[in-house]
Amino acid sequence: MQSVQRRGVARGAAPATLVHDEGVRLDGDRLVALYAELGEAGAEAVICRAMEDLATALADLQRLAMACDLVAMPGRARLLARVAGDLGMSSLCRVAEDAALCAGRGDMPALAAVLARLVRIGDRSLTAVWDLQDRD
């Protein structure tokens, strides 16, 4: 039997693993402004509610993507972008805006990639804000 070797893959080589290690950008000044404006209890209530809204919007976008609902997705992504922007989550805001654009254009391959990135950035952004609150 003749040995078959695929082009570009050495025989016996381990498959490559793509590591997604992208940092997130937070505008800490925005959170400081919330605390200055609303006081500690008020700011924490607003931030907690916004974090819940972000988590819900991320889950909704994943559900809408599974249902291929390109009509509802842009609005939900823009809502996520607005809430993220209000909290100073600039990376999450930008990626959510990209998701809204891809969904609005009906570009499914781009949307799939952007949604995967949105989930990664969303998880990291939520964790970063919780970490900032824990330090206070």
Image (cartoon, rainbow, N blue to C red):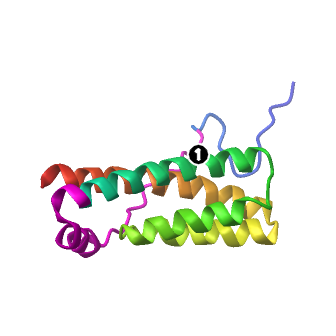
Residue depicted at x 64% and y 60%: 76
Image-based side of 114 in relation to 131, left or right: right
Residue at the outermost left position:
136
Asked if one can make out residue 45 in the rendered structure from this viewpoint, the answer is yes
Within 10 Å of disc 1 (Cα), the crowding (few <14, some 14-19, many 20+) is few
Q: Please, is residue 2 above or below residue 86 in the view?
A: above
Relative image position of residue 41 (x, y in whole percent): 19, 55
Image-based side of 19 in relation to 4, left or right: left
Quadrant housing residue 112: bottom right
Residue at the outermost top position:
1
Quarter of the figure that contains the N terminus: top right
- Check residue 54 for magenta coloring: no
Relative image position of residue 89 (x, y in whole percent): 39, 67
- Check residue 23 for magenta coloring: yes
Q: Which residues are magenta?
A: 15-42
Residue located beneath label 1 in the image = 59
Q: Please, is residue 45 above or below residue 10 in the view?
A: below
Residue at the outermost right position:
1
Quarter of the figure that contains the C terminus: bottom left
Residue depicted at x 76% and y 50%: 7
Quadrant housing residue 107: bottom right
Q: Amino acid at mark 1?
A: Ala
Q: Please, is residue 19 above or below residue 93 in the view?
A: above
Image-based side of 110 in relation to 29, left or right: right
Q: Nearer the viewer, residue 93 or 17?
A: 93
